[in-house]
Amino acid sequence: GIGLPEREYYFADQFKTQRAAYVAYIERTMKAIGHANPKAAAKTIMAFETAIAQVSWKVADRRDIDKVNNPMSSAELAIYAPGFDWTAFFAGAKVPAQKRLVVGENTAVKALAKLYAETPLATLKVWQSFHIASQASPYLNKAMVDSRFEYTKVLSGQTENRLRWRRGGDL
């Protein structure tokens, strides 16, 4: 759901530079894929991801085995976290109904289902189009590769992108 490494990147002052680099990357990506208003799209995407981050668990909570072990069936999940079409989700993933799933961030899943239900379809579409383009960017043209690297170097501190033939070996 989020493009920054952890939820804290959306809120902590120490990550202002990373947030700014991410918004610029979103805007460049949306422009590259032909979105009519890349700046507005970047603002919408960042606002939606910030809402996702708000209800997501902190890293320490996600490491607590007692908190993340929340078994339930597919049917129980649909009742527990309404607002998201779990049946369609599992069908699309070609996963049959399950008697036992482990729902890691159970309170976050419930809040995210509610968030998705309340979010306009246009927001979900622009957010999804960005993430599809972002995930594909390492394999697209040089402009997309360079744009992604401009963002990720702010996170990693890496000053130079690996050679194309080395990146190609990661496929």
Image: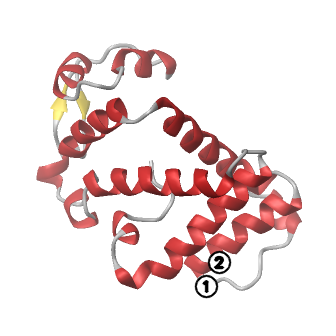
Mark 1 residue crowding within 10 angstroms, few (<14) / some (14–19) / many (20+): few
Label 1 to label 2, Cα distance in Å? 5 Å
Q: Residue, x 28% and y 53% (percent of image)?
A: 56
Q: Residue, x 51% and y 57% (percent of image)?
A: 3
Residue type indicated by callout 1: Gly
Q: Coloured how?
A: secondary structure
Indicate whether 70 appears above or below 136.
Answer: above
Give the image location of residue 74, x and y in percent: 26, 20
Give the image location of residue 41, x and y in percent: 59, 50
Instruction: Find out whether the residues at labels 1 and 2 contact each other: C-beta distance under 8 Å.
Output: yes
Q: Secondary structure at mark 1?
A: loop
Give the image location of residue 57, x and y in percent: 25, 56
Indicate whether 143 appears above or below 94.
Answer: below
Q: Residue, x 52% and y 81% (percent of image)?
A: 17
Q: Residue, x 50% and y 19% (percent of image)?
A: 92
Q: Secondary structure at mark 2?
A: helix
Q: Would residue 128 be found to the left or right of residue 108 on screen?
A: right
Residue that badge 1 annotates? 157
Residue type indicated by callout 2: Lys
Q: Would residue 152 be found to the left or right of residue 123 on screen?
A: right
Determine the image quadrant of residue 141.
bottom right
Q: How many marks on residues? A: 2
Residue that badge 2 annotates? 153
Indicate whether 126 appears above or below 94.
Answer: below
Give the image location of residue 12, x and y in percent: 34, 77
Determine the image quadrant of residue 91.
top left
Determine the image quadrant of residue 106.
top left
